[in-house]
Structures are given as structure tokens and as C-alpha cells.
Amino acid sequence: MQALQKQPETSARYAKAIEVSKRVRWDIERDVIRGRKFDFGKKFLPDGLSKIGRLDFLGADEKRLVSQIQGRTYANMFGLVERFIAPKVSEISRGHWLGDQTAFEALVRFTDEELKHQELFRRLERMTAADMPAGYAFLPQPNVVASAVLSKSTWAVLALICHIELFVLAHYREAIEPDADLSELWKDVFTFHAREESQHAILDEIEWQQEDARLTPAQRDTAVGDLIDLVAAVDGILQTQAAADTDYFVRVCGRVFDKAQVKALGEALLAAYRWQYIVSGVQDERFQKVLGGMVTEAQMKRIGAALAPILG
Ligand SMILES: [Fe+2]
Ligand SMILES: [Fe+2]
């Protein structure tokens, strides 16, 4: 009975997602890039996300370069996660094939948007590569990461996706939108991206809750373990990329740093990446509320214990 009462309301949320998706739909060239290039006289990633204020041995130009390197990695990270988001959303759309056609359409649009976002982020990488010194490397291999993620339970993958799409919105709202000193094109990319991501976050929440309702307590307990494994895997990626980006900065920055400074840089980048891709998402109020509504107190403690070393 309860399920029957919930149905029209859920269907209306899918319909709303379609309506907004149609209204905000943008084109990579016509709306976002518009023949422009990145302004390297300005920052890419805002201070609120890059956390480089604490590195007082860096000059203003050097801080700007760190922000640009982090901004380049930020775009590549989204291209990476979208490699598993698009197929997962396409896969779960199967549950609606012969059912709610509105839900099916909403998830098809969602998938299509993530394919477009990946194209946008590949385009940005080519643009930044042409204008920055050689030697930058984004190390994670999208298909390797995606196949490892997709081997986990749907509940855990949807939890990870929901977390990602909620932090996209939080980053935009709290750090990107209020910063007036960013490269105009870089800021526009993440403004347009956030507009389409708003609908994704709503759909993630619905689909994750529906998946949750299908699980037995034992299956959910296994899924919590999968989520912990996924967060550990994300952290492994962040450690590798923070080291690669530190190395790139030191090589192209044009002056010599002592060992302690290189170490401080590496630690600052890892702390920034952990904030960007893990901490800001798990601390998001909306995420906490949805997750808290599904797991037991003991499971929440397990998740908390796994996160403790990352939260530092
Ligand atoms: Fe996206
Ligand atoms: Fe998305």
C-alpha cells in the first residue's frame, strides 16, 4: 500500500528531472567553449578547494600554477568517474524498461549527459596540454578503474555516485561560484556541468533508495563493505595523483625547492584531493541523511572507522 502511495510522487520527480534536463541542456562548443581559451593569468581551482593558502613558501604565481594543475586534474577526475557512472546508470535503467517510461527516459538522458561530459573533459585536457609545459600525467586509467568499480554491488556503486554528484554541487555552490578570480572559461565549464548534475543527484538518490529497498540485511551488510573498499580505492588514486602532480609542479615551476618543501607540497595536495573527492562528499548533509536512513548504527561506525585515517 505504501509503495503504491509513493509511486506517483516518485514518477513526478523523474518527470521534473526530464523537464529541467531539457531546459538547461547545453552544447560543448556553442555554449561552453565558444571559441575561447583558458586564461593562464588566472586561477582554475578556487582556494576553497585547492587548500594552497597554507603553503606560505609559495609566491602568488606559484600558487596560481598549483591551482591550474589541480584544476586540470579536477577535470580529468570527472572524466574518470563518468566512465563508470554512465554505464551504471544505463544498466539500472533496465529496471524501468517495461515499467515507468518516464523513469527510463530520465536515466537515458542522465547517461547521455555523462557521455557528453566525458567528451568535454577530454577536450579540456587537450586544451590545457597545448598551453601548459609538457610532463603532466593523469595516471588513473578510466577503463581499469571503471571495471573495478562496476564489479562491486549496485548499492555501493550508487552510494559512490550519489556522493560524487552531491559534492559536485557543493563545490560549485560553496567555492567555484563565489570566486571572482578564476579563469572565465574554467568557471563556465563547472557552472554548466553543475546545471546538469543537479538532476543527476536527485536521480541517484531515488535509484539508490530503490536498490536499498530490494536488499536483505545480509546483502546490505556486504554492500557496506563494498562501499568501504571503493572509498579505499579512491584514496589510492588520490595518493598516486597527488604525488604525480607534486612532481610535475616541482619540475616546471622554475626554481629549486628543498626536501621539506617538496614534502609539504605533497602533503598539501593529498589533503586537498582528499577534501575534494572524499571528505566534502561524505560530510554533505544530504548524503549523510540518505546514507543514515539506510544503514544500522554498527554499519555507520564501520564506515566512520574506515574514513578516520582519510579525515586525518
Ligand atoms: Fe558529469
Ligand atoms: Fe552526473
Image (spheres, rainbow, N blue to C red):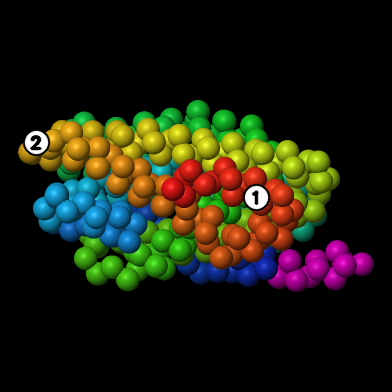
Q: Which residue carries the number 2 mark?
A: 256
Helix, strand or loop under label 1: helix
What is the total number of numbered labels drawn onto the structure image? 2
What residue is drawn where x is 29% and y is 33%?
244
- Image vertical order of residue 239 relative to residue 310, above or below: above
Mark 1 residue type: Lys
Q: Nearer the viewer, residue 169 or 289?
A: 289
Q: CA distance from mark 2 to mark 1?
A: 45 Å
Q: Residue furthest top?
A: 144
**For residue 9: magenta?**
yes
Instruction: Evaluate whether residue 181 shows in this view.
Output: yes
- Image vertical order of residue 139 relative to residue 184, above or below: above
Magenta residues: mostly which secondary structure?
helix
Seen in the image, is 203 located left or right of residue 133?
right
Q: Give the image quarter of residue 153.
A: top right
Mark 2 residue type: Val
- Image vertical order of residue 303 relative to residue 18, above or below: above
What residue is drawn where x is 35% and y is 43%?
270
Q: Nearer the viewer, residue 60 or 309?
A: 309
**Do the residues bearing badges 2 and 1 touch, measured as CB atoms within 8 Å?**
no
Of labels 2 and 1, the one closer to you: 1
Seen in the image, is 209 located left or right of residue 248?
right
Residue 107 spot, x, y in % from top left: 63, 53
Residue 143 spot, x, y in % from top left: 50, 30
| Residue 301 image label | 1
**Mark 1 Cα shell of 10 Å, populated few (<14), some (14-19), many (≥20):** few
What residue is drawn where x is 13% and y is 35%?
258
Question: In the rendered structure, which disc, 2 or 1, sits on the residue that comes first in sequence?
Answer: 2
Q: Give the magenta range.
A: 1-12
Q: Give the image quarter of residue 266.
A: top left
